[in-house]
Amino acid sequence: MNSADMLVSNGIVLTLDNENSQIKNGSVAIKKDKIVAVGNADEFSGWEVSRIINAHGCIIMPGLVNAHTHAAMICFRGLADDLPLMTWLNDFIFPAEAKLDEEKVYRATLLACAEMIMSGTTCFCDMYLFEDAVARAAKRSGMRAVVGEVLYDFPSPNYGPIEQGFTYSKMLIEKWQNDPLIKIAIEPHSPYLCSPDLLKKAFSITQANNILLVIHVSETESEVNNIKDKYGLTPIGHLADLGVLAPNLLACHCVILTDKDISLLHHHDVKVAHNPESNMKLASGIAPIPRLLEEGICVGLGTDGCASNNNLDLFQEMDTAAKLHKVNTFDPTVIDSATALRMCTIEAARALGLGETTGSLEVGKKADIIVLDTKKPHLTPMYNPTSHLVYSARGSDVKTTIINGEVVMEDGRLLSLDLEKTMDDVRKIAESIRTC
Amino acid sequence: MNSADMLVSNGIVLTLDNENSQIKNGSVAIKKDKIVAVGNADEFSGWEVSRIINAHGCIIMPGLVNAHTHAAMICFRGLADDLPLMTWLNDFIFPAEAKLDEEKVYRATLLACAEMIMSGTTCFCDMYLFEDAVARAAKRSGMRAVVGEVLYDFPSPNYGPIEQGFTYSKMLIEKWQNDPLIKIAIEPHSPYLCSPDLLKKAFSITQANNILLVIHVSETESEVNNIKDKYGLTPIGHLADLGVLAPNLLACHCVILTDKDISLLHHHDVKVAHNPESNMKLASGIAPIPRLLEEGICVGLGTDGCASNNNLDLFQEMDTAAKLHKVNTFDPTVIDSATALRMCTIEAARALGLGETTGSLEVGKKADIIVLDTKKPHLTPMYNPTSHLVYSARGSDVKTTIINGEVVMEDGRLLSLDLEKTMDDVRKIAESIRTC
């Protein structure tokens, strides 16, 4: 007899497989950490099942994947808004960041994980300081994560000089190499804060360890001008020149791109993380995402940090992405709802090198699954579940979140963390920042 | 001894008065339908109060005002997306609208009211067919509304030829003239669907009755070209030429404006309804809102109908408005959070001619009040309540909604309607539309 540890049953199943297959009344069977079957609900009638999650009237879909964030920046949420970029950075963010330490990053990341789990995100890619704390917080919360310590030319509050940044990153690789949830990446900040040597060394470590390389690139006009002045090339051209464009590179932002940049990204199969809300809020510009998709470039959506968004709700991010590119191109057909949804699930997973692990409901993949309650006024009536997920739903419609086969939220109740304590810890951090 | 029927107590009070006054631990006292006091919580210690709504850890603020929607279009939510405008209209929306009748509009509007109340909207301005049904549904739900039958040159499924449209509108004015919640407006669709005679007659009725005139105008490039071809003027210029620009005109959309248009709007004190999400989704363009605000023009935010948004959540609309204009002007300081919040409260109320009635928490105003729960991960920590309302909150954070002194939602439970039945009725309407 067929058996499963858990059956998420009787919902509308959106698989996000290659055909975007949907099942009107379907179920997903889980054994340990893996999906073992996806099909019509009635196919499971004879199964021996230890636990049933009833998803009647709900949507069952892969957990969302946040392709770019700085989770611990949650403790700066709303600290400073509506300011010129340099005032925001120099007068608020940098002084506040100087007050952080490993413990604060751990506590802040726990809150970010709580927010993500409760709004349907099951995996995120993080760049920040004290990333061992980020990895520990993600694991403690039960979240899947790709984490990497930010590297730059000047001394870091965590590791000091850059040589020790590489030592620290290698420690992370070693420490977390067999973890089922955590993957380590190497994350040089940007071409404007990293020397060519730093970038080349970072790249070579990723090649040797077969891991992701993550960088901010071409985020603003002033960055592009800066790199052109320094190297006579666009930031993407500069990275190409250094030989670091490759399929394992996740290029975050890519707001300002030339045709040649786009063809370089395509040629080297570079992955792109698109953060529309952050780019809008900081007035950086609008990335040419419809062009990138036409070229077949893999694009995942990210929220960026909470200081420039100011939340981690990927449902809102999908909605914004779908609408922003329509008005920007005067074409209501671009970034349709199916495309936006893929950018937050399977495409984001692929962008993080986790395309075989998560991002869709397919047999053999890890059981990263969310259940959304659609019996709500703002999701009624329902002609098309995909449209609702992108244009009508909110993170708060997520009812149940399963990561790696573990139920981390059920019926809106977070199970993996003490939510009150998690919030309270960050309120205390905020007090110390407010009075600095 | 001072007394009140209700005290909303011990929260962070955002008054949205002229100074955007905030009270860190404040209360709002209500007698019958009116606000009788706003102050520090301890000022109310000796009061005799019939009912207390405890807002500890919450934000107390005016209910949001939706300056432009077509509430009954909720039954087309997600029916058709990501399509060229004319395909969307001709192949989906118009055939679906042909299936509507007074009863369906009533049922659909009830659902829209449920969605609005549950996401913190206490007042809306509606343009659609069968507006007597809309008025009845708003009143049944306990919502404040400005409603007006859409008028155009061709026969309407409701009233037939345009002469009867005016008769119907006058009936509405008479029927609802003494209602505490409902105000009637005259609502010619647009300069491209309404003859100069229709527009002038509509205007004269509003002047005679001292009521609002509502119109779609300058929404798309093709509309502007159409009016230029026909009249040799921009749509705003054409309205000026007809003598219908006035302080009681609510001009919805205003996406495509010339400098001269802007100065005409300013000169005549015309009010503007801005619907950024709809304009984005339909790829119409980006209205020059920062320019309008610089000129001192009153701008209220609206969601437009659910077929082009696809929800009625004004929190999301504020967020989008604040971010969209930043990226569009490459200036992160425009539409700051305080401005965005005013556009959804007091400025929207002013745009509807209800600036003395609702939109702020001030003594003498009607008690239209919402309470938001901030004890949630995505609203933690909190440095600045206004920032959170615009950039972090969602409609689902609204806990309690009071309209005209009546509690219509408490602790997330809708009190004025049977929510299950309301959703079910619209599911049935959707079935009849789907199979058409």
Image: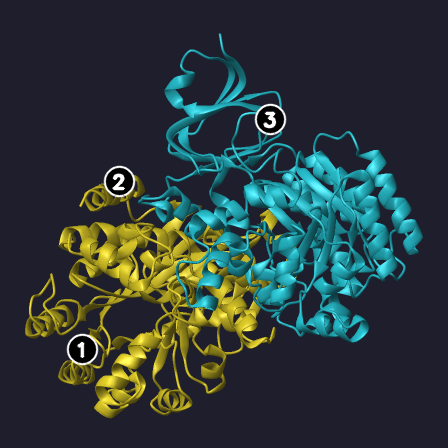
Chain colours: A yellow, B cyan
Mark 3 belongs to chain: B
Q: Residue B59: tell me if it is visible.
A: yes
The label nearer to you, 3 versus 2, is 3
Q: Is residue B115 visible?
A: no
The residue lying toward the viewer, choosing from A99 and A39, is A99
x and y, in percent, of residue A398 in the image:
46, 53
Q: Are marks 1 and 2 on the same chain?
A: yes
Residue that numbered label 3 is attached to:
B405
Which residue is at the front of the view, A350 or B324? Answer: B324
Q: What is the quadrant of the N terminus of chain A in the image?
A: bottom left
Q: Is residue A383 left or right of residue B7?
A: right
Say which amino acid is labelled 1: Cys
Mark 3 touches mark 2? (CB < 8 Å) = no
* Position of residue A409 measured from the top left corner of the image (x, y, whole percent): 38, 50
The amino acid pointed to by label 2 is: Asp
Mark pair 1, 3: CA separation:
60 Å
Residue drawn at the location 43% of the way across and 50% of the way down: B337
Number of numbered discs overlaid on the protein picture:
3
Residue A123's x, y, as percent? 34, 64
Chain under callout 2: A
- Residue at numbered disc 2: A424
Q: In the visual, does B262 lie left or right of A366? A: right
Local secondary structure at mark 1: loop
Q: Amino acid at mark 3?
A: Gly
Vertical position of residue A409 compared to residue A33: above or below: above
Q: CA distance from mark 1 to mark 2?
A: 36 Å
